[in-house]
Image (cartoon, rainbow, N blue to C red):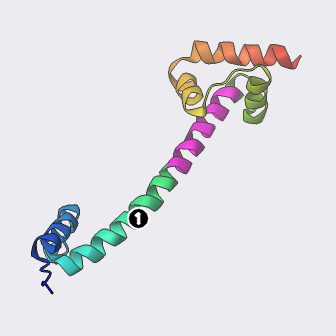
């Protein structure tokens, strides 16, 4: 029976982890065991924080839309439901950008929603 030597495969897998650990402090960037644990935790934090970032941005967009809609006399919920009734399919990111940078276009949307409410 032939003997299986793991030199190249082991080196490749270790190198992959050590490359991911670049920028970590101390032995966490040079020693495999410490780097492996550090990378595993970093990847878990990365996954969780990417999910949280999506939540945070949606909350921020909602706040911007609400503030702009209230300047024109509508609440956020009434404005969003009015957009849906009119068949205007704009996502919240676009609406928040319009509210901040294109006040005229946002005002036209608000007027359209107000006219459909009456």
Looking at the picture, does residue 31 appear above or below residue 66? Answer: below
Give the residue at mark 1.
45
Residue 52 sits inside the magenta stretch? no
Residue found at the very far front of the displayed protein: 1
Residue name at image x 51 percent, y 55 percent: 52
Q: Residue at x 60, y 33 (%)?
A: 92
- Magenta segment boundaries in residue numbering: 54-69
The residue at 29%/77% (across/down) is 37
Point out the residue furthest to the bottom here: 1
Quadrant that contains the N terminus: bottom left
Vertical arrangement, residue 38 with respect to residue 94, above or below: below
Q: Position of residue 100 (x, y in %)?
A: 53, 25
Binning the other alpha carbons within 10 Å of mark 1 as few (below 14), some (14 to 19) or many (20 upward) gives few
Residue at the (45%, 53%) spot, across then down? 50
Please state if 9 lies on the left or on the right of 39 as rendered: left
Please give the count of numbered marks on the rendered protein.
Answer: 1
């Amino acid at each position: 029976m032939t003997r299986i030597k793991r030199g190249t495969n082991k080196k490749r897998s270790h190198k992959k982890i050590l490359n991911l650990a670049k920028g970590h402090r101390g032995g966490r960037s040079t020693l495999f065991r410490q780097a492996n644990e550090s990378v595993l935790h970093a990847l878990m934090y990365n996954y969780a924080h990417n999910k949280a970032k999506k939540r945070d941005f949606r909350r921020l967009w909602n706040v911007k839309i609400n503030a702009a809609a209230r300047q024109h006399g509508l609440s956020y919920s009434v404005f969003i439901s009015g957009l849906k009734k009119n068949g205007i399919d704009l996502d919240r990111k676009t609406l928040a950008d319009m509210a901040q940078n294109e006040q005229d276009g946002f005002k036209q949307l608000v007027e359209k929603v107000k006219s459909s409410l009456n």
